[in-house]
Image: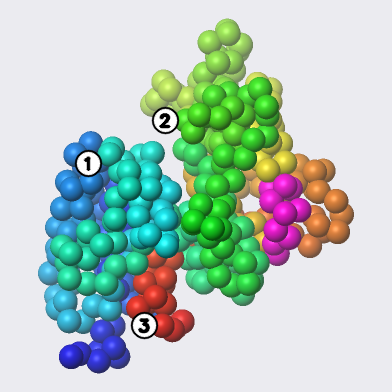
Amino acid sequence: MVKERNKPYIIGVDLGGTKILTVVATAQGEILLRKKEETRALGGPEVVLDQMEEDIREVIRVQGIDFEEIQAVGVCAAGFYNHRERVMVKSPNLTGWNQVPLARMLEERIALPVSVENDANAAAYGEYRLGAGRGRSHMVYITVSTGIGGGIIADGEIFHGSQGYAGEIGHITVDLHGPRCNCGNRGCLETLSSGTAIARRAAEMLASGSPSRMLEAAAMEGRQEVTARHVFTAAELGDAEAREIVGRAIEYLGAGLAGMAMLLNPEIFVIGGGVSMSGDSFFQPLREAFCRRSPGPVSENVEIVPAGLGDEAGIAGAVLLAVEEFAGKKE
């Protein structure tokens, strides 16, 4: 039996609907090797699990290490993951992933202990331990990208709720008569403030014939389709329509954060995802919108800052959570 101190490596897997990132990392969260490829999502759970196994075995081989040197595998995945049952109840981005015992099925393939966490929760934990939330015990992580997700750190631990679904800020209703969401509801924050929502609103405005520099911003990148990034660029160039779209999206997001602040009283909001990379043109009006919606005692002591780990927050969190679950310690 190899002693734990001689097992210095963790394998991390970030399972998404479009890509799988597999890494070799140390128990302190330092990533040594990365492998990324497209997810064979349409093949269903068995095909994707076979792909995960192949990738894990490949990074182990390329890194030149033995299975006996690996403590565990940490997985983060998009979807509703039930921690108590160790089951992926549903994943909207993975075909056929309903009631899939992800951890057990992967353990059977690779004969290593497997820890699984929702991707937003894992990203929240990565930012808490190694990123913008380091040193804070009460933190809310929000990712604003294609959709909107979130994770909650309370007293230094992930707050899962009764089954593991806590932190789904993107599906808080902020407009009773708003656009239909993929979840089936109307007026979810995700339908009003995500990158997808911003791009959709831009397309509607352009279709009405409104003159705008949004098309110019897209053309600068050789594209015809306007994305959220192009809307932010046009807004910075002074385009009135783009400013209206951005302002509306940020106002709704500020209202969502205000509600979370009054419910959870965090020290800090850490904002990740593609939309958050717009810099001060995003964060300054967001802070102002948040303060307008929050009572002084709540808003005065809350920071709103960009994430520090970028796209690797989830994989970092998954690695650290695997260390804690199977080594029983924080590094």
Q: In front: mark 3 or mark 2?
A: 3
**Residue 244: % across, % down:** 68, 26
Q: Residue at x 68, y 55 (%)?
A: 304
Please provide the residue range marked out in magenta: 257-267
Determine contact: label 3, label 2, CB under 8 Å. no
28 or 189, nearer to the observer: 189
Which mark is first along the chain, 1 or 2? 1
In the picture of the structure, the residue carrying the numbered disc 2 is 221
Disc 1, SS: loop
Between circles 2 and 1, the one closer to the viewer is 1
Q: Is residue 326 left or right of residue 226?
A: left
Q: Secondary structure at mark 2?
A: loop
Instruction: Report the disc number at residue 327.
Output: 3
Quick check: 226 above or below 162? Answer: above
Residue 235, quarter of the rendered image: top right
C-alpha gap between disc 1 and disc 3: 32 Å
Residue 195 makes an appearance in the image? yes
Examine the image and state in which quarter residue 43 appears. Answer: top left
Q: Is residue 161 left or right of residue 62?
A: right
